[in-house]
């Protein structure tokens, strides 16, 4: 056991007859950053939905396995109790409440947490993202993509989670903004919140994380310390876009013909 | 001129009552994305509670019981019926509400029978004369009550946690669930609020100059449908504007009926629907509705 960390054991998820996850196990020990890499459709978002108990919105269900936070089983709770237990998710694509003001978005984020800590959470969030204090009374839909991502992260932090689930935070952001989000994730982690980061941008994710898992077609195919994975050929080739010498040479000889028009 | 002012003021008063009904309709739609066809029967239930209790309890306690009763009926419909279907298609749920409406209305009309029940209100048929304009006290009370309730509702909607949860759920149920919003509670609350508002509306639909609560009262409640729809189903502002528009239209069409005899009788009942169709032709999502909802 890992104290009060998040543990997923032998988790399988199905959408009707379609199996999306097959006996996935992973651990997010207290105060660490763990990343899950994988291409589209590998089951990354399904994994997060299974943890946050929002699978039913997509017609999915956990068929076996368990999810625990410390000694507490999460996989039988309704979504609001998972938030109250200390696990908040930042959904893919930000999903801020566009018609509500920034301040009301943050209030919505605090609905699941303890009433007492709200003022402290708000102060923390405003310190992390000063721009959200400036824009408090603007509609969230009018923020830029990067600011919306900040708001989505801030909103999840309002419940003062022990574990933050981040689904593709760099998606659709300019590299500079992605870098700022990465800095923020590091800062949030330094303040003691564990982070489970799901990313397609493997380079960024492996720099942030201490431990990494690779998910392929619903199964964990690789796992290890992030540094080791970043150095492995398999991950370098498939997720970091680094090709070895031979492959590079192949690509070069082929390259001469790649720009011809296809007349099929 | 004085008749015009009178008709207009009566229309505004009637419209504010429709706005109360439409608001309940919109609240349920925003919280659950379900079009609630059972709304008229909630209204009838509220009116029936008040009508059958005012002799024993006196008017004001009976009204409170009526409001609480209709809220309870609304909550019960959500809890025992709608909740079992959660996750089903919204159009399926809308049809379930038609079934609920038929059941409730059948039972209530059986109890009411052919009677016309008085609600025992304190205003009677007193009329206020302001120069050439005369207005029934009931119409003034209706307007004041509706304005107070709507203001209170909007404040709650804007500033309380319940309001935030409600608006969050309206934008995206899934994201709201991720925030720890209890969707079941939000929808239960919405049905209860809608029931309570409908009970108040029932009172003002049945007081002077209307004879009283009868089986056909639920038909009058149906006029709030065009109000909610022409305002935009998901907009509280739309419900208010739509309600007023329908009330004034109906009042004008009825008031000037004698000048419009070539159109036949009963234009007042028809006019709200004509306005709705005309507005939807120009703005398919309603006056204040969100564009995406045009697909629903």
Image: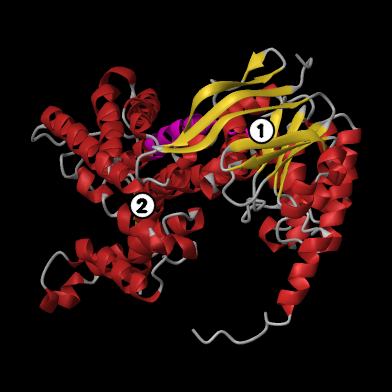
Above or below: residue A98 compared with residue B44: below
Specify start and end residues of the magenta stretch as a single range. Answer: B179-197
Residue A47 coordinates in the image, percent (x, y): 60, 36
Q: Residue furthest left?
A: B114
User: On the same chain: label 2 and label 1?
Assistant: no
Tell me what residue is drawn at x 55 percent, y 31 percent.
Answer: B182
Q: Residues within 10 Å of mark 2 (few under 14, many from 20)?
A: many
Can the viewer see residue A7? yes
Residue A111's disc is: 1
| Quadrant of res A196 | top right
Is B89 situated left or right of A150 in this image?
A: left
Of badges 2 and 1, the one in the foreground is 1
Question: Foreground: B255 or A204?
Answer: A204
Residue B136 on the magenta span: no
Which residue, given by chain and number where applicable, does mark 2 sit on? B18
Residue A59's disc is: none
Q: Main secondary structure of the magenta part?
A: helix
Chain letter behind tag 2: B
Q: Secondary structure at mark 1?
A: loop
Residue A23 coordinates in the image, percent (x, y): 57, 28
Q: How is the image coloured?
A: secondary structure
For the residues labelled 2 and 1, the Cα–Cα distance comes to: 33 Å
Chain letter behind tag 1: A
Location of the N terminus of chain A (image quadrant): top right
Above or below: residue B163 compared with residue B244: above
């Amino acid at each position: 056991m890992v104290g009060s960390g998040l543990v997923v054991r032998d988790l399988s998820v199905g959408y009707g007859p379609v199996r999306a996850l097959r006996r996935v196990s992973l651990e997010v020990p207290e105060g660490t950053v763990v990343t899950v890499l994988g291409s589209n459709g590998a089951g990354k978002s399904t994994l997060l939905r299974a943890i946050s108990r929002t699978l039913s919105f997509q017609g999915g269900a956990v068929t076996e396995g368990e999810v625990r936070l410390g000694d507490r089983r999460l996989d039988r709770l309704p979504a609001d109790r998972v938030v109250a237990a200390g696990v908040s998710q930042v959904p893919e694509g930000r999903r801020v409440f566009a018609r509500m003001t920034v301040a009301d978005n943050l209030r919505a984020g605090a609905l699941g947490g303890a009433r007492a800590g709200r003022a402290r959470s708000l102060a923390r969030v405003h310190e992390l993202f000063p721009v959200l204090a400036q824009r408090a009374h603007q509609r969230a839909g009018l923020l830029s993509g990067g600011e919306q991502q900040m708001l989505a992260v801030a909103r999840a932090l309002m419940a003062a989670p022990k574990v933050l689930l981040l689904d593709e935070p760099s998606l659709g952001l300019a590299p500079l903004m992605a870098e700022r989000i990465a800095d923020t994730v590091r800062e949030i982690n330094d303040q003691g919140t564990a982070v489970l980061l799901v990313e397609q941008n493997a380079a960024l994710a492996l720099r942030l994380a201490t431990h990494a898992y690779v998910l392929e077609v619903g199964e964990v195919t690789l796992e290890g310390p992030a540094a080791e994975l970043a150095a492995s050929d398999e991950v370098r080739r498939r997720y970091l876009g680094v090709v070895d010498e031979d492959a590079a040479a192949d690509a070069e000889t082929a390259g001469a013909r790649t720009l011809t028009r296809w007349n099929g | 001129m004085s008749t015009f002012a009178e008709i207009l003021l009566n229309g505004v008063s009637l419209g504010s009552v429709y706005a109360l009904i439409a608001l309940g309709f919109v609240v349920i739609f925003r919280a659950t994305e379900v079009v609630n066809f059972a709304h008229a029967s909630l209204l009838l239930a509220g009116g029936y509670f008040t009508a059958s209790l005012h002799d024993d309890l006196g008017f004001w306690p009976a009204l409170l019981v009526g409001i609480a009763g209709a809220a309870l009926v609304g909550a019960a419909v959500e809890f025992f019926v709608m909740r079992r279907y959660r996750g089903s298609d919204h159009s399926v749920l809308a049809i379930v509400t038609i079934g609920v409406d038929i059941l409730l209305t059948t039972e209530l009309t059986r109890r009411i029978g052919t009677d016309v029940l008085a609600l025992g209100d304190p205003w009677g048929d007193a009329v206020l004369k302001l120069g050439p304009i005369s207005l029934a006290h009931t119409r003034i009370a209706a307007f004041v009550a509706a304005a107070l309730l709507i203001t209170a509702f909007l404040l709650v909607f804007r500033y309380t946690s319940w309001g935030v949860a409600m608006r969050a759920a309206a934008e995206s149920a899934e994201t709201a669930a991720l925030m720890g919003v209890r969707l079941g509670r939000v929808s239960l609350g919405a049905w209860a609020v809608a029931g309570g508002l409908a009970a108040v509306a029932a009172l003002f639909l049945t007081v002077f100059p209307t004879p009283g609560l009868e089986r056909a009262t639920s038909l009058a409640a149906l006029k709030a449908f065009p109000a909610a729809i022409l305002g935009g189903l998901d907009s509280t502002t739309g419900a208010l504007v739509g309600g007023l528009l329908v009330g004034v239209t109906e009042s004008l069409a009825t008031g000037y009926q004698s000048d419009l005899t070539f159109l036949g009788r009963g234009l007042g009942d028809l006019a709200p629907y004509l306005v709705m169709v005309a507005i939807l032709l120009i703005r398919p999502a309603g006056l204040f509705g969100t564009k995406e909802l045009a697909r629903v």
